[in-house]
Amino acid sequence: MMNDTGISAARPTAGSGDGNVARRNSNRPKYSRFTQQELPACKPILTPQWVISVFTLVGIIFVPIGVVALLASNDVVEIVDRYEIACVPPNMTHDKIGYIQNPSISKTCTRKLKVPKDMDKPIYVYYQLDNFYQNHRRYVKSRNDQQLRDASKANETSGCDPEKTTADGMPIVPCGLIAWSLFNDTYSFTRGNGEAMIVNKKDISWKSDRDHKFGSDVYPKNFQNGALIGGGKLDPKIPLSKQEDLIIWMRTAALPTFRKLYGRIDVDLKKNDIITVALENNYNTYSFGGKKKLLLSTTTWLGGRNNFLGIAYLSVGGLCFFLSTAFTVLSLVKPRFKKKGGWMNTKAAAKRERGHSSDLFFSSLIPPTLSTCCSSDSIVRPRPQPPSRATFSNEA
Amino acid sequence: MAPEQPLLISSPRYSDQPYDFSTINITPPATEPPPTSSSSSLHNPNRLLPTTANQSKPHLPPLPRRYSSRRSFNSSQKLSELNESNARFVYINDPTRSNSPYQHPSNSIHTTKYSLLTFLPKNLFEQFHRIAYIYFFILICINQIPQLGVLSPAASILPLAFVLSVTALKDAYEDYRRGLSDRSENSRLASIFSPTSFSFEYKPWNQIRVGELVRVAAEDPHIPCDLVLLCTSDPTGVAYVETINLDGESNLKTRYAKQETLAKPPETLSGSVICCEKPNRNIYGFHANLNDSISLGPANVVLRGCELKNTAWVVGVAVYTGKETKVMLNSSSAPSKRSRLETHMNRETILLAVGLFALCAITTVLGGAWLGRHKGGLDELPYYRKRDFSGKDVGKYEYYGIGWEIVFTFFMAVILFQVLIPIALYISMELVRLGQAFFMIQDDNMFDKERGKRFQCRALNINEDLGQIRYVFSDKTGTLTENKMEFRCASVGGQDYSGGAGAGEEEEGDGVSVIVEGKLCKPKMKVKTDPKLVDVLRNGKGTEEGDRAQNFFLALATCNTIVPIFAETSDPTEKLIDYQGESPDEQALVYAAAAYGFVLVERASGHIVVEVSGQRQRFDILGLHEFDSERKRMSVIVGFPDKTVKIFVKGADSSMFGVMEKTLNAKIIQATELHLKTYSSVGLRTLVIGMREMNRMEFEEWHSSYEKASTALFGRGSLLKAVAANIESNLSILGASGIEDKLQQGVPEAIESLRQAGIKVWVLTGDKQETAISIGYSCKLLTGEMIQIIINSNSKDSCKKSLEEALATTTKLASMPPAAETTATGLGAGRTLALIIDGKSLLYILETELEGELFKVATSCHVVLCCRVAPLQKAGIVALIKKRTDDMTLAIGDGANDVSMIQMADVGIGISGQEGRQAVMASDFAMGQFRFLVPLLLVHGHWNYQRMAYMILYNFYRNSIFVFVLFWYVLYTAFSLTTAITEWSSVLYSVIYTALPTIVIGILDKDLSRKTLLKYPQLYGSGQREERYNLKLFILTMMDSIWQSLAIFFIPYLAYRHSTVDGSSIGDLWTLAVVIMVNIHLGMDVFRWNWVTHVSIWGCIVATFICVIIIDVLPILPGFWAIFHVMATWVFWFCLAAILVAGMVPRFTMKAFSEFFFPRDIQVARELEKFGNINENRVSEVAMSTFSNNQQQSIL
C-alpha cells in the first residue's frame, strides 16, 4: 500500500547528510533479544545418557507402583452374585418379561452367599447392570437439572422427552428417562445365624449432589404415574436431596456395564460366613437381556478390585527397562560413527581418505548433507579435468 | 521558424529570456491543423475555444518535450486516439461543468475496506471464501436441525464464531488504522482558487473537485491530486518534483507547465477545456490536450503523492481526484499466492476428509446393526424408549424409522467428528505467518543501513515457501549491483583513457568547482580523472584530438536529462551540486564531465548552462529525443553560443555503430570497438557517443517535423521516433564511456552460500554478454574451472544445433563415472558447467519444441546466465522451470523489467533500490540488498518452513487424537454418539486448551541458531527435500495419534471398567489426558524452551484444569463436582500417569533411536551447536580447501 510509506512523510532531501543518517536509524528496528529471536533458551537434546536415564527412571517408578497396585487390588474381597436368571421362578423361565411385568407374582427371591475371606467393614453393597446403556444419547439427555434443583422450576421439563408430563399435561418431577428408569431391586441381608445386617443407605451419594444438585425442597410429583412404569417409585414426601438412590442413579454411568452403590454394611465378615440375601427382583432387565449382579466388596486406597492398573504399570515399567537396556546395548555395540559408516558406504571410503578418524562424533555433518544435495538433483558430478571452454556459437 | 526569431540566439547569462514569451498565446490550430483523426470526435459544441489568440507566431519556440518511453514495458497504454468514450473533459476553473454529466469522485481517499455498517457482511463474505469455513458453517446449520443436534447451538457455533471474530478483529484493527491515516490525509489543507472571491482559499483536500485550480507552494509541498501544470514560479514553467512515494525514485523529476499557459494568470484560462484520457494506473503516461490544440504529456502533470522541490509554487488544474489518482490506482495489494506447504496440506486435508467419512460410515453401519438387533425392544427399552406416552395418544418419540435413524446417525457423526479437519489451523497459520513476518521485518540483519529500509513482507501467505527454494532467478543491474554508476574509462577518438586510478588522487582534493550566487559549488560525487585526458583537454585546443575531447565532454554534459540541484553543506560558503536525474548512467556521465571541467550548472526548459573550463556558457536545447528501448539511444540538439547547431547522440554500441559515418572514422571506430570489448570484459557498462553538426536547412527540416510530431494527438510516440531515427544518422564518433556498476556488498559470498545450500542461481540480465560474463566472474557465479556452454544463435536451426551439441556435452559429462568422490566436496571442486545464452537465441527456443532441450541443458548446468533478455523472456525462463519441475522458484529484481519475472516465480522479491517501486509493488517480499537473500532463505526461510510444517502436522495430530478418543467412546454407547467429554470441553479444545502453544511454537521455535544455519548452508536442503512435511510423516503422525488415543481411551476404560464411575468423571479424565498429552507431545518436539514456550505450554495445561473445574462447578450441568471427586482418587492420577507414559513411549523411542542412530543433518548440527565444536575446525578446513581449489583453478 502506498499509504504504508506515508505520503505525508517528509523525505530526506538529497544531500542533507546528517539528517539522512538520523532518519535511517530511526527506521531501524529496535534491537531486543526478543525481536532478534535470541531469547535465552534451553535446548534439550536426546543424548544416550538422557534417553537411558529417562527409560530407567520410568521403569524404576512404574514397576513398584505396579506391584503396590496389584497387591492393593488383591487385598480387596469381592462377592459377586448374578441373580437375574436364578430369581425367575422355574415355571416362568420361558417368559421372563411376562414374569417381571406381572405385578401379582411375588418378586422376592433368596440368595445365599459365602464369604471367601475375612472382610473388614465397611463392606459396600453394589448392584451391577450389564448391557444397560446409561450413556445412550437419548438417555443421558433426558433429564432436566434445573427442575431437580429448584422447586420453582417444576415446570421446566425441556429435554425430558418422552417422560415430560403426564397424559393430562402435569409436569413430572423428576422428569426424564433417567429418573423414570430408576433401579428398584432391594436387598436385605442376614448372616448365617439369622442376625440381620443393617444396610446403611445414608450418605452413599456425593455430598455435592445432595447439597447443590438436588433441591431439599423439591418433592417428587406425578412420578411413575404414566401408562408405562419404568422402575422404582419415589416417596413424594421425601425431598429429592434425600432420595439417595435416585441421586446415585442419576449420575449416569460412563460405560454400558456399571456398578452403583446400594449401601454400606458396617459389620466385619468372617471367612466362610453364609449370608442370606432377601431381594426383591423388581427391575426389568429381561427385555434387553441385561444381567444383574449383587456385589459385596471391601475397598482399599485404590478403590475396588481391578488388576488392570497393576499389570499396566508393570508392563510399561518393564518395557521401559527393556528399552533402556536395548538402547544401552545398541549404543555400545553400534556407536554412532560406525553406524554412519555402514549406512553410507560410499561416503565412508571418501571420509577415510580425507582423514576422518572414527572418533569424530559429528563426522556425519558433511557426508549426509552432500549425499542429499547432490543426489537429489541432476547436477553433473564434478570430476577433475583440465580447464577448457566449449563454445557453441554459430554466430560470426 | 518565424523570421524575427533568430534561429540561434547568442547566449547571454542565463537570467535573460531568450524568447519573447509575452507574445505567445494559446495557439489556435490555424497554421498547424489538428490531426483530423481526432478532431472529428472532439467537436463538442460545449467546448470553449479561446478565439482571442493572435496569429502572429505560426511556430512555437522549440522546447524540449519529453515523452517518456524509457518505461516502455509499463506503458501498456500506448498513445491512442482520444474520443468521447474514453476521454474526460476538464473545464479549467469550472468544477461544476467538469463534473457533469458524470460526477467524478471527490478527492477524499478511502483506503478502508469497510464502514461501520458494511463491516460485518463484507468481512464475513470475504472470510467465507475459505472452503473450510463453509464446511464448518454447513455443519453448524445441520446441527441446528433438532434431530441432529449433537451439540447445543451455542457450543456448535462457538469455534467458528471464535475463528471468524479473531480474523474480523484483526481486519477491523487494520482497517481502523487505515481509516485514521485516511482521515488525516483527507483533512489536510490545500489552497484552491475560488471563482467567487477570485483568490486562492484553503480547503481540505477531500473537497478538491476536478476542474478546480490548485496552488501548491513550497511550504506544504505535497500534491493533493493529479494536476495538470498551468504555471509555476519558474518563468520558464519548470517545476521539480520528488516522486519517492509514487515510484520510489529519490531523484528529482522535471515537470513543465506549457508555455502557452504559464504566461497568463491561471484564472484567465477559465473555461478552457482539457481533454484527457480516462484515469488509468500508468504513472509514466499521460495523454491529453488543451483546447484541442496544445498537447499535454506526462511531463505536464504532477501526481498525487509527489512533493514539490526547488520550486516556490505551482498552479495546476485538478484532472484526477481521490481514488482516480494514479497513486491510488496503483496501490494494489500484492497478488495472493498459495504456499507449497498449504497445497500439500490440502492433499492431506482430503485424506482426513476420507478418514472422517470412514469413521462416520463405521459408526453408521454399526449403529444401524445395533438398531436392527434391538428392533423389537426399542419401544420400551429404558434407555431408548421409542414410545411416548405423555400425550393423549401413544406416539413415537423422536423415531423416524430405521432408515432415517441411520441417516441421522451419519450426519450426527459428521458433526461430532468434524474437528478431524482442523478448523483452528487456518487461523493459527494466519497468526503464525503474521508473527513470522514480524520477526522478519524486525531482523536487524536484513535492515538496509545505507538506505534505511526495512525488510517488507507484502504477501503474508507464502512465508514457508522461502525454505524450499531451489532456483533463484536474479536480475543483474540494481540487484547484484548497486546501480550506482561510476565513470571509469573513456575512449575518445580511438584513444583509451582509463588511467584514472593513480595520479588523480591529489587533483581530486579540490576538484572542480563553480561559483553560483557567490557560493562555491562542487559536484557531490568525485570522479577520478585521467591525467592524460586532462592534459589533452587543457593543451589540445584547436587540435583535432582536443576538439574531439571537448565535444565528447560537452556531449556528456548536455546529452542527458539531468537537473543540477544545489544542496547546502555545513560550510555556508560552499554548496554541493547534486545531479538528479532518472538514469544513474547519466548521472555518472555528468559527474564525469564535471570532473573534467564541464560543469552543468543550470537546466531550464529551453537551455542549459555549462561552465566550460571556468567559462560559463549557455546552450539552447532545441530538441531532445528521449531514450527508448527500440532505438537504444538518445539525442539532443544543441544550439551553441556560436550559433552553430549540433546533435549529440549517445547510446548502446549495437545501435550506435549502425548510425555512424563509417568511411571517415573507420580507424577510430575500430579502435573504439576494441576498447569497448575491453571495458565490457571487465564488467563496465558502455555507451558510445557521437555527434554531427547540423546546417540550417537540415535543422529547419527537422524542426518542422519535430514540431508536427510532438503536437500530434495521434501516434505521437511513433512519429517522434521516426523523427529521431531520421536525424540520428551519419554521426561522427566521439568516443565511448565505460561506467562501472559496483557489485553490491556481499554478493559473491551470498551467491556462494546459496550455491552451497543447493540453490541454483540463474542470472537474467539485459546487459551484453561480455558484461554479464564478467559480472558473473566478479560475483563468483562463474569460476575458472567451469566449462562454459555459450549459445548465441541467429536462427532456429542453429539454436537447435547448439542445443544438441550442448546436450551431448552434458550427457557425456554425466555419464562419466563420478570420480570426484575423493575430493573434499562435490560442489565447486571438479568440473561444472555453465550455460550462457542470449535473448536472441531464447527467442527461437522459448515456447517452441526446443524448450525441452533447453530445459535439459540448463538444469544439468550449475550456472545459467541469460543476457540481453527482454522482460517477458525473463518470465518465460521462470515459466520454463516452473512448468517442468516441482522445484520452487524465486525471482529477485529491482526494476520494472523484472515485474513479469517476479510475478511468475513462486516467490517474488523486489529490491527496493534505485529503480523505483515497480518491482516492489509486484513482489511478495521487498528488501534492500541482494545479500539479505541469504538470511532470508537460509535462516528465516528454514525456520518458517520448519515451524509451519511442524505446526500443520501437529494440528492434524492434535485434532485427530481428540476425534479418535471420541470415536472409541462412541463404540461403547450403542453408537449413539454420546460424548463423555463435555461439549464445552470439546468446543474449547482446539480454541483454548491447545491453541496457544502451537502458535507460539510456530512463531518462536528454532531448530538451529542463525549462526549455524549461516555457517552450514547445506542445512537448507531439508526444506528443498520436503523433509519436514510429507506423506510419510503425515501417516506416522496419524498412527501416533491413533496409538495415543488408544492409550488415552483404554487405560481409563480398563481401569474403571465395572466400577461406579460416572460419565462426567471419566470424561474429565479423558479431557485432561488428551490436553496434557498433546501439550507434552508438543513440548517434546520443541527445540528451544524459552520463557514464552514455558508459559504457553504449562499455561495451557493449567488453563485446561481451570476450564474443566469451571465447567464442573456449574450445578446445572450434569457433571457437577465430578472433577473434584475423581481427582480425589488415586486411580485418577495413576491413570493419568500411565496414559502419558504409555502414550509417549513409542514416539519417544522412535525419536531417540532415529536421532541417535540415523541422525539428520539438522540433528547433527544441533548437537554440534550444543556440545561445542569437536570438529568445527575440520569442517571449516574442508570448506576452505574447496574454496582455494577454486581459486587455483580459476585461471582462464
Image (cartoon, rainbow, N blue to C red):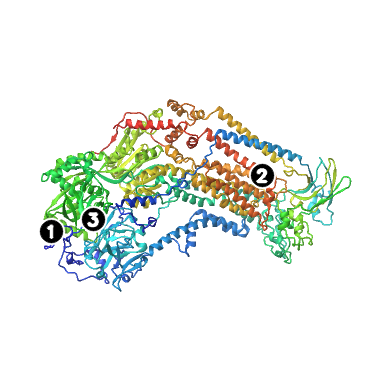
Of B40 and A256, nearer the camera is A256
Label 2 marks a residue whose chain is B
Circle 1 residue: B7
Q: Position of A103 compared to B551: left or right?
A: right
**Amino acid at circle 1:** Leu
Q: Position of B514 compared to B788: left or right?
A: left
Per the model, the C-alpha gap separating discs 2 and 1 is: 104 Å
Circle 2 residue: B1133
**Amino acid at circle 2:** Trp
Per the model, the C-alpha gap separating discs 3 and 2 is: 86 Å
Task: Point out the image quarter for the N terminus of chain B.
Answer: bottom left
Label 1 marks a residue whose chain is B
Question: Where is residue B327 drawn, in percent x and y?
Answer: 35, 58
Pointer 1 local density, CA inside 10 Å: few below 14, some 14–19, many at least 20: some
Question: Where is residue B939 drawn, in percent x and y?
Answer: 44, 42
Residue B223, quarter of the rendered image: bottom left
Q: Are marks 2 and 1 on the same chain?
A: yes
Q: Mark 2 touching mark 1, by CB under 8 A?
A: no
